Amino acid sequence: MAFEEKLDALLRRHDELNDLLSKPDLAGADFTKYSKELSGLTPVVESIRGLRAAEAELGDAKALLADPTLDADMKAMAEEEKQAIEKHMPALTRALQLALLPKDAADEKNAILEVRAGTGGEEAALFAAQLFRMYQRYAAQQNWKFEILSISDTGIGGYKEASASISGNNVFAQLKFESGVHRVQRVPATETQGRIHTSAATVAVLPEAEEVDIKIEDKDLRIDVFRSSGPGGQSVNTTDSAVRIVHLPTGVMVQQQDEKSQHKNKAKALKVLRARLYEMEREKLANERAGMRKEQVGSGDRSERIRTYNFPQGRVTDHRINLTAYNIQAIMEGDGLKEFVEALITEDQAAKLAELG
């Protein structure tokens, strides 16, 4: 199908959906399905109409300029209008191209955030805690809900690992490129000779799966309950409220003990398990479709070093897109993170447009 024919088909489908939704006897399930399709199609249709309106205006301006009877003043006005439209056309064309890009089905989903200390001992754990709080602050600035699922702390401010559920508008779309190894370079508080140490923490951002996305059979689960314990084996409570779930077909294991209720711990553990299984399925499909080819912006491979935070120089560098910012404190407070989020999304869109071209 030619490009213009494809655009015409999208316009016709938009009109069809409006007609279907106006019918009083439409079933509730169909109403939901058609409404969702219309919502996704509307930005595309608006871009098509905007570009075609500009093309029509450009044609009118050129026709005026070609008219030999037109006086000089009218010709000057037509030339000015033609140049203004031509200047605006690339932006309209790009907006349409972006609207036509295949959508990641997970982009609109909420996310499970997991941060773990990597190499570097206590300094890595302190950095992991900082990263976790950075995302918590960023979530607050986006008016997202940030629910802590679990924290395994070191007792002196560091986190061995921590996880949270983040819900709101387009959470996964914004945070999906944060997955990978984050490296920190700085002088630890315990360093007496002022030497710079390098440590690391890993970040995983998983789309939160609904029950309709991943069906988990009871027979595929091994569920163990045990007594919760805090740092150093200190007893947190005296009941068997902690829950460990193993998904037998894949070997994925999730443990949850933050809540005093066994039922709440089980619900949280299942939420994380579902997200991990959903991400495994997504990665499998992505690898099949891409022929194991790494995407230009981040493959999600946990072994990658995606970003370096250099505190002595006050800079943060994202190695995938060669972006460096010298506002490390603002970034750690969440404010400055948006520059990286938006740059990564833009780079990903550019890569996809290049593939289409």
Image (tube, rainbow, N blue to C red):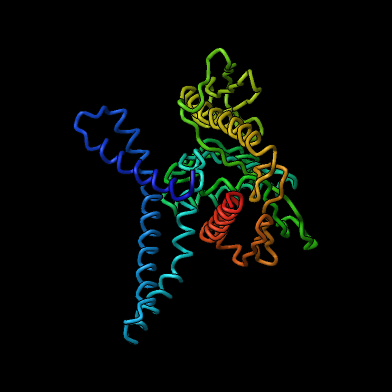
Residue 207 versus residue 94: which sits nearer the camera? Answer: 94
- Image location (x, y in percent) of residue 69: 32, 82
Tell me which residue sits at (49%, 53%) in the image. 98
Residue 353 versus residue 226: which sits nearer the camera? Answer: 353
Can you tell which quarter of the image residue 312 is in?
Answer: bottom right
- Image location (x, y in percent) of residue 66: 39, 76
Residue 341 in the image: above or below residue 254 = below
Residue 97 in the image: above or below residue 311 = above
- Image location (x, y in percent) of residue 337: 55, 57
Residue 314 versus residue 49: which sits nearer the camera? Answer: 49
Q: Furthest residue to the bottom?
A: 72
Residue 170 versus residue 157: which sits nearer the camera? Answer: 170
Q: Furthest residue to the front?
A: 68
Total residue callouts: 0
- Judge whether residue 239 can be spotted in this image: no
Tell me which residue sits at (55%, 30%) in the image. 278
- Image location (x, y in percent) of residue 139: 47, 50
Q: Furthest residue to the left?
A: 24
- Judge whether residue 248 can be spotted in this image: yes
